[in-house]
């Protein structure tokens, strides 16, 4: 702050362009017979003390680290999300455990898919940073209680999992904001 001329200098992060992917599948498998069709991804959840899992009580989508987002600013934008699916599971005796399944999702977004659309020159000139927001995560899960699978040499219970989310990609730049005015220096009585 420059108290002599009454200005305050700030900076703000301004959104240059934005892309919204609604209900995007981010954890899935592709159908071997039709690669353009998505199907649930089969996972194996480690049993609890050798007892099969009978219920999945909760699932948490753990994505809260900035370094998990990679944006490539060379004519298109590539996002890579690294996340964990955290399952709270229960066996028939009521014992509970936590099981973690890592996941990675990568997608290339063309510049014309942003609003407003950008040219490669505009991307290089105007964009300084990028951010990906993950919202409205939705899980479709089928636990196969009567089946078995093997994970790391131990018996487990298989589950078919699909995860969808809204992805918001913001391309941003920093800009200076200058506030001009007078300082109100009121004397306070103690």
Image (spheres, helix red, strand yellow):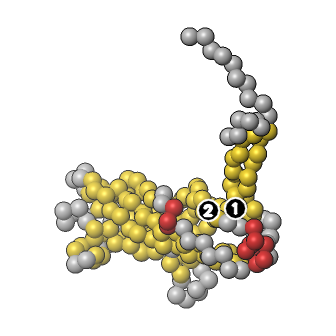
- Secondary structure beneath disc 1? strand
Q: Which residue is rendered at x = 76% and y = 45% of the image? A: 178
Residue at the bottom extreme?
Answer: 33
User: Residue 34: which disc?
Assistant: none
Residue 3 on image: x %, y %: 71, 35
Q: In which quadrant of the rendered image does the N terminus lie?
A: top right
Quarter holding the C terminus?
Answer: top right
Do tag 2 and tag 1 residues touch (Cβ < 8 Å)? yes
Q: Residue at x 25, y 65 (%)?
A: 47
Looking at the image, which is closer to me, 133 or 45? 133
**Can residue 170 be spotted in the picture?**
yes
- The percent position of residue 13, horizontal first and vertical second, equals 68, 55
Which residue is drawn at the image coordinates 74% and 36% (left, top)?
Answer: 4
The number of numbered badges drawn on the structure is 2
Where, by quadrant of the figure, is residue 171 drawn? bottom right
Secondary structure under badge 2?
Answer: strand
Q: Nearer the viewer, residue 145 or 106?
A: 106
Q: Is residue 47 left or right of residue 166?
A: left
In the rendered view, tell whether residue 80 sits above or below residue 171.
below
Closest to the camera, between mark 2 and mark 1, is: 1
Q: Position of residue 125 (x, y in %)?
A: 75, 71
Neighbor class of circle 1 (other Cα within 10 Å; few <14, some 14-19, many 20+) is many
Q: Residue at x 73, y 52 (%)?
A: 176
**CA–CA distance between discs 2 and 1?**
8 Å
* In the displayed structure image, the side of residue 58 where residue 18 appears, left or right: right
Percent position of residue 186, x then y: 69, 19
Residue assigned mark 1: 172
Which of pointers 2 and 1 lies earlier in the amino acid sequence?
2
Q: Is residue 19 visible?
A: no
Which residue is at the far front? 4
Which residue is the site of mark 2? 131
* Relative height, residue 159 to residue 30 (above, below): above
């Amino acid at each position: 702050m420059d108290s002599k001329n009454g200005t305050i200098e700030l900076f703000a992060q301004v959104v240059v362009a934005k892309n919204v992917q609604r209900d995007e599948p981010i954890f899935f498998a592709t159908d071997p017979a039709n690669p353009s069709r998505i199907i649930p991804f089969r996972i194996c959840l480690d049993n609890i003390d050798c007892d099969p899992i009978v219920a999945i009580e909760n699932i948490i989508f753990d994505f809260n680290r900035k370094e998990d987002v990679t944006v490539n600013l060379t004519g298109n934008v590539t996002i890579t999300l690294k996340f964990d699916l955290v399952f709270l599971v229960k066996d028939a005796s009521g014992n509970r455990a936590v099981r973690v399944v890592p996941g990675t999702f990568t997608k290339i977004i063309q510049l014309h898919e942003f609003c407003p659309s950008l040219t490669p020159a505009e991307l290089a000139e105007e964009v300084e940073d990028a951010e990906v927001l993950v919202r409205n995560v939705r899980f479709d899960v089928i636990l196969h209680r009567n089946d078995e699978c093997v994970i790391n040499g131990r018996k487990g219970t298989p589950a078919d999992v699909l995860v969808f989310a809204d992805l918001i990609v913001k391309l941003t730049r920093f800009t200076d904001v200058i506030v001009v005015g007078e300082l109100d220096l009121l004397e306070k009585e103690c």
